[in-house]
Every structure is written in structure tokens, then in C-alpha cells.
Amino acid sequence: MIFFDTSYLVRLYLDEPGSSAVRDLAKTQPIAAAWHAQAELLCTFHRALREGRLNTESYQVLRSQFYHDQSASAFEWLTLSDSTLSHLDLILKDAPANTFLRTADALHLACAAEHGFQEVYSNDRHFLAAAPLFGLKGINLFAQ
């Protein structure tokens, strides 16, 4: 099983730089992601609508495809728990002061570590830079 953050999940649905590499990798193993990535993904679809990258019909098609994939168990959504938060707090306690770590990224990374992953996939530079703090190897399949 492979762990994707939202930057990779969105490439399964939208044509963005690196989408083909992410889709090829997704064909090889089941995909896991933190539970909150569902909300991030839906908001990303809406952002594409707002920005004019999607029209209303395409937006609705993407949402329907996502819910179809959900019902087909295309993803394993990993829970966030009190122990995930405790793990996150321990990491932050000793993190260097100059660590740039957004809340959603921290939840992804703590969740992946808590569920025993060794590697996480993303193209977000801040996410990838913070991954080692959680004992994770961050992998980017493509350069931005």
C-alpha cells in the first residue's frame, strides 16, 4: 500500500503536471491517505471550478467519479486519533524553530507515521521537507 497526500490524490482526477506518473504508480498498489484528505480533495475540485479550470458540468462529473471510487473502495482512508495528535505534538516539541509545517500536512505526516508507513508521496516541497521529522521518506515522482 502507498500513502498519497492530497497533492497526489488530486492528480488522479485533474490533469496537472505529473498526473500521468501519479496515475501509473496508483495502478501498482492500493492507495492510502489520511481521512481529512477527502475534504481537501473536494475543496480542490471546487477551487478548480472557482478558478475556471473546470466548468460546472466537469466539476459535477469529478465529484461523481470521486464518490464512485469511494464506493468501490479505491482508497483506504486512515483515521486520525488522539494518538496521532500525541505523535504530532512530540514531533513539534523537538522540531527546529524554522520548520515550515502546515496543519494539514502535519496531520498527513503524523497519520502516515502512526499507521506504519515508511514512505509518503507528494510534490509539495514543505511536506517533503518535513517528512523526515516523522521518520518518513518523502518521495516526489516528478519535478515541478
Image (cartoon, rainbow, N blue to C red):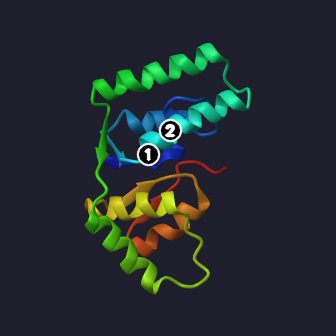
Q: Which amino acid does label 1 sit on?
A: Ala
- Crowd class of label 2 (few under 14; some 14 to 19; many from 20; radius 10 Å): many
> Where in the figure is residue 92, as x and y percent of width and height?
45, 79
Residue in front for this viewpoint, 126 or 70: 70
Circle 2/circle 1 CB separation < 8 Å = yes
Residue on which the image places disc 1: 37
In the image, residue 42 sits, relative to residue 94, either above or below, namely above
Which residue is drawn at the image coordinates 26% and 68% (left, top)? Answer: 83
> Where in the figure is residue 24, as x and y percent of width and height?
45, 34
Which residue is drawn at the image coordinates 26% and 62% (left, top)? Answer: 116
Quadrant assignment, res 135: bottom left
> Where in the figure is residue 9, as x and y percent of width and height?
47, 40
* Left or right of 15 on screen, residue 111: left
Which residue is drawn at the image coordinates 51% and 69% (left, top)? Answer: 130
In the image, residue 63 sits, relative to residue 43, either above or below, namely above
In the image, residue 6 sits, relative to residue 73, either above or below, namely below
Q: Is mark 2 on a helix, strand or loop?
A: helix
Give the Cα distance between marks 2 and 1.
6 Å
Mark linked to residue 94 = none
* Left or right of 138 on screen, residue 71: left
* Left or right of 65 on screen, residue 84: left
Quadrant assignment, res 124: bottom right
In the image, residue 121 sits, relative to residue 50, either above or below, namely below
> Where in the figure is residue 126, as x and y percent of width and height?
59, 64
Q: What residue type is labelled 2?
A: Leu
Which residue is drawn at the image coordinates 28% and 52% (left, top)? Answer: 79
Q: Is mark 1 on a helix, strand or loop?
A: helix
- Crowd class of label 1 (few under 14; some 14 to 19; many from 20; radius 10 Å): many
Residue in front for this viewpoint, 4 or 87: 87
Residue on which the image places disc 2: 41
